[in-house]
Amino acid sequence: MRDTIRQALMERREEGGALPSIRDLARLFGASPQTVHKAVGDLAGEGVLHVIPRKGVFWGPRPESTQERIFRVPVRQDVRERLLADLRQGVFHPHRELPSRKELARIYGTSARKIGSILDQCAGTGDLVRRGRCFLPPPPLVRLSQGVLLVVVRCDAAGRILLESEREVDFLKSVRREALEHDLRVLVVGYHERPGGGALLDPRGAPFSVKHVPGVLVGCIVSTWLVLRPRVLLSSLRGASVPIAVWWEHPRAEFPTRGPGGAPIAGFDLSFGKSPGLAVGRRLVAEGFREAAYLSPYHDNDWSRARLLGLREAFRPMGGEIHEYVDERFQSHWQLEQESGSIAGARRRLRRILAGFLADPGLGRIPAWVVVNDIATVEILDLLRESGRDRPRLVSFDSASASESLRFDSFEFHTDGMVRRMFHHVFHPDDRATAREPVLEMVGRLVLRS
């Protein structure tokens, strides 16, 4: 078995590329971690690959520059940066105590003593605050209870809020829960986008201004979900000198460096990065797949392309291949509905696009399919059932109710974590994390159902 693994690894050699973890390789080959470790050790002894402590295993001899860099960065610093990144990305609640030293040591694979030293260091730099034996993020400078939180989401010309996806519903529910916990009153205002501009509207459809907010305005939370010109939306908040937290569903490079009127502003990226594709790809690689198909009927956007990039990055170390089945005419299902004129018309067009993918005989030979979102996955399953074809290994994104009822795996975006971080910005606009990264990418998780 040891020689078999050694030979299989050699066939997938990519100079400078990283290998999966020992555990992932063990699952991949159906061997024990000890056997895989010995095979890797043999190749390392021959100089075929090299091991960088706490970084991984890589093909080829260790570059001199890499050796110098690794030895200059203490292990403690590596764990500290991971901890701070997790705080920024919503892994831990920004207003509650962190887990115990013992639990953190288990999470980060180090000792409780080292974790304690790291926590003390973070407290010394102001990234954390110590309370007895516990640590937590810095509390807000002032309490904002009894104030008004302005929430801006899409609406139609009559001022009716548009909630056309489960994610939008989850977002508003999460905002209301968090506001209740902090004793804030929520005022939801619609933004109606039209050609050449847009306007804030109250529930009656009348024009709205931040000057109309009753009570003390303490902050703004803004959703740019399916808004085509988000900067125009933000400009409508001119006059609000309070912190603005933005659910930014657009390329990061387009995020404004300053808020309207110089207000403190921070962006939160829920689904635009490549990390969801990476998570899905790593799962498939761990299951032993060497190739997968990526199906996207909405590929005229950055989020679909980012998921594809993440998939490719996950498969690259094992020499895996991702086959593209994409249509670049539409940016989203919402745009497809707008151009089709009705929900039924959009579904017919979507099914035609997907049927075109399924007509390719090459797709049927690929064992794993990754679909850009749950809407498209539902239609693919329907088309497969109608044609009497077997269901491949399917993974999707969104983790909507359909993925639960139809039992397919789907990546879940961490809406609650994003909302908590948005409130943290309202309470703590001078937070160092948002100063370093104007748009913070939130973490999510792959929900396994199949």
Image: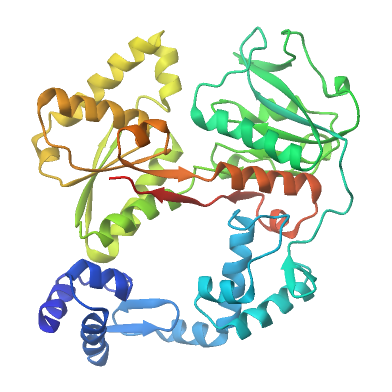
Question: For the view shown, which residue lies furthest in the bottom direction?
Answer: 45
Residue in the image at 60% along x and 39% along y:
254
Residue in the image at 59% along x and 76% along y:
102
Q: Residue 97, relative to residue 23: is it above or below?
A: above
Residue in the image at 66% along x and 17% along y:
197
Tell whether 181 sits left or right of 89. Answer: right
Q: How is the image coloured?
A: rainbow
Figure quadrant of the N terminus: bottom left
Q: Residue 347, relative to residue 313: is it above or below?
A: above
Residue in the image at 87% along x and 43% along y:
144
Q: Is residue 161 among what the camera can see? A: yes
Tell whether 87 sits left or right of 235. Answer: left
Figure quadrant of the C terminus: top left
Q: Residue 94, relative to residue 348: is it above or below?
A: below
Instruction: Choose between 126 and 249: the one closer to the eye.
Output: 126
Q: Quadrant of residue 299?
A: top left
Q: Quadrant of residue 26?
A: bottom left
Residue 440 image offset from top left, x and y in percent: 61, 50
Residue 230 image offset from top left, x and y in percent: 63, 29
